[in-house]
Image (spheres, rainbow, N blue to C red):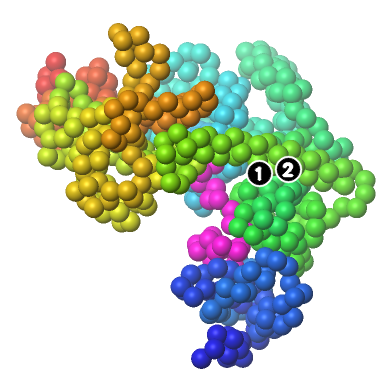
Amino acid sequence: MDSSDHLSGIIGAISDGPGVYLMKDTSGEIIYVGKAINLQKRVASYFQRQDAHGAKTELMVARVADIETVVTASEKEALILESNLIKRHRPRFNVVLKDDKRYPSLRIDINSTYPKIEIVRKTPKDGAVYFGPYSSAQAVRQTVKLINKTFPLRKCSDRTLNHRTRPCIHHQMGQCLAPCCLPVDPKAYREMVKDVILFLKGRTPELIRRIRRHMQKASDALEFETAAALRDRMVALEKTLERQVTVTTDFLDRDVIGISGNSDFRLVSVMNLRRGFLQGIRHFEISHAAPEKGELMAQFLAQYYQQTHGIPGEVLVPELPENSELLEETLSEWKRRRVRIRHPKRGEKKRLLEMAENNSENTLRERLQKASREAAVLDGLKRRLRMDRLPQRIECFDNSNLAGTNPVSAMVVFVEGRPYKAGYRRYTTRTVSSPDDYASMAEVLTRRYSKLGSSGPEPDLLLVDGGKGQVNIAVAVMERLGLTGRFAIAGIAKMDADKKETEDKIYLPNRANPVNLGADGRLLLLLQQIRDEAHRFAVTFQRKQRARKMIKSALDGVAGVGPKRKRLLMRHFGSLNKIRAATENELSRLPGINESLAKAIKQALV
């Protein structure tokens, strides 16, 4: 059957109700997910007058081999389902945002008696209050540092809170009320938590007025120490307010969205304004034949606000999205308050939109320049290492041991010159017990490349930490596995100061002398960064392995301390030295450890 006849038959059988459609290519891969109030009419429109569509849609329609639909009860349900399916399948022709778990958020568990502020990567619906996600981890840490200095919230974990016997150094510095050990009024503590939440919501002027009222009240009651503490807190917040940038005069919460780029690549920038103050800007890259602005806005807004906790009352966009009324209704339902989507044509809001678009264009220009520089480095490595393709994916191996004990290996992955931590791997050597670097390297390379595909994609460049010996081992392993010539192999060896060498050396197979990387120092710098990251990763793993074995051997003879209690001790104290320094009283506070067992542990660690 002809493919057009096959698709015509499918379209004829599609429901005319609301729902979601999934377009697939010849391999069965989902290449596009869309929603419609009338599925049949919407899907049929792709195949009628194709010359009226944009380049991206024409390219997509040419690849469609099959169509699947899911009927929903309403268009609102279709909108939510579309967003979830895009996130799950990541189709090539949809707008796909990176998962926000990569970005840090701030969490305050308001259900706790004494809440604390913490940095998290995941934001489940657990009743806690979340702020973010934030694009800059450094900015988040600075915010937490400021809050900890200004508001004396507890810093310790829940486990430490329940088992601490004396206040920590934060209490001595005046940065914690020490609810772990001292009587702290939960009501007064909760008032302080409300102040922190106001601050994180960007309502600093309102918070300053609130603290001033409390300060006056404490002063009138002759509670001068409390009034002085509130005065210091107010002064710190006023200094913070001076550094914030006011960009509107109506002091409302809104997000302003700017878009730059073309149909091949777009950058979407979200400018967050809270109470008229600029809180930050986040940027999202949209590639793979980016859609037109109206379609992009619809898919972007649905995904972005589904995975963020701070939906403002107004969203300014450079072009109204498709079905903007439906999106407004959905966002209002998520926020539980009215949300408006606006495309301003004049006035202050138009100025805000121009500001967001200027920021987007500047950031796009900077990113393209950076990408160009990185591409030049990869191209330089390709030429100098005589590779047949760009080293888009580089895998580097390093071994680590301490005087021959606890030998381990590690692999790090760099994709397009940047660390790809999801691809990192750790190896505990199985066949090598003595300090034999060559044998360890041969084992881990065999384990990694004997199952290409299931253990990760093929690299463009295999980099080993070492000189000609390690390179020869890598070549021998690839020959044995039948992978000769599949990818390039190189070794990086440290300079020998005794021989008056001035830089690290790069070795290739079947070549006695190191490679001359030329005058561009960025080529060697990239390889050094990759080698150093592999070394850091391997050494960190080796230390963890050694710590586990140390506590295992130290407590092996203590009756009543098995694997479960060893893990409990390590999880609570963090290291063998801290367990050794703990008092019997601190040990006995742990669940399952009584006074006699705590005494036995102390005697075993003397």
Residue 419: x and y in percent read 45, 38
Using the image as rendered, state which of residue 53 and residue 317 is in the foreground: 53
In this view, the residue farthest toward the right is 346
- Report which residue position mark 1 lands on: 283
In space, the residues marked 1 and 2 are separated at their CA atoms by 8 Å
Residue 55: x and y in percent read 70, 66
As drawn, 225 above or below 283:
above
Q: Which residues make up the magenta segment?
A: 82-105
Residue 111: x and y in percent read 50, 43
Q: Toward which corner of the image does residue 84 lie, by quadrant?
A: bottom right
Label 1 crowd (10 A; few <14 / some 14-19 / many >=20) = some
Please report whichever mark, 1 or 2, sits nearer to the chain's N-terminal start: 1
Residue lying at 59% horizontally and 53% vertically, measured from the top left: 97
Q: Toward which corner of the image does residue 54 lie, by quadrant?
A: bottom right
> Which residue type carries mark 2?
Ser
Using the image as rendered, state which of residue 145 and residue 589 is in the foreground: 145
Q: Can residue 583 be spotted in the picture?
A: no
Quadrant where the image shows the C terminus: top left
In the picture provided, is 306 more to the left or to the right than 260? left
Using the image as rendered, state which of residue 447 and residue 297 is in the foreground: 447
Residue 204: x and y in percent read 73, 31
Label 2 crowd (10 A; few <14 / some 14-19 / many >=20) = many
In the picture provided, is 534 more to the left or to the right than 19? left
As drawn, 177 above or below 477:
above
Using the image as rendered, state which of residue 293 and residue 141 is in the foreground: 293
Residue lying at 60% horizontally and 23% vertically, measured from the top left: 146
> Which residue type carries mark 1?
His
As drawn, 34 above or below 415:
below
Q: Which mark is residue 360?
A: 2
Magenta run includes residue 177: no
Q: Secondary structure at mark 2?
A: helix
Q: Secondary structure at mark 1?
A: strand
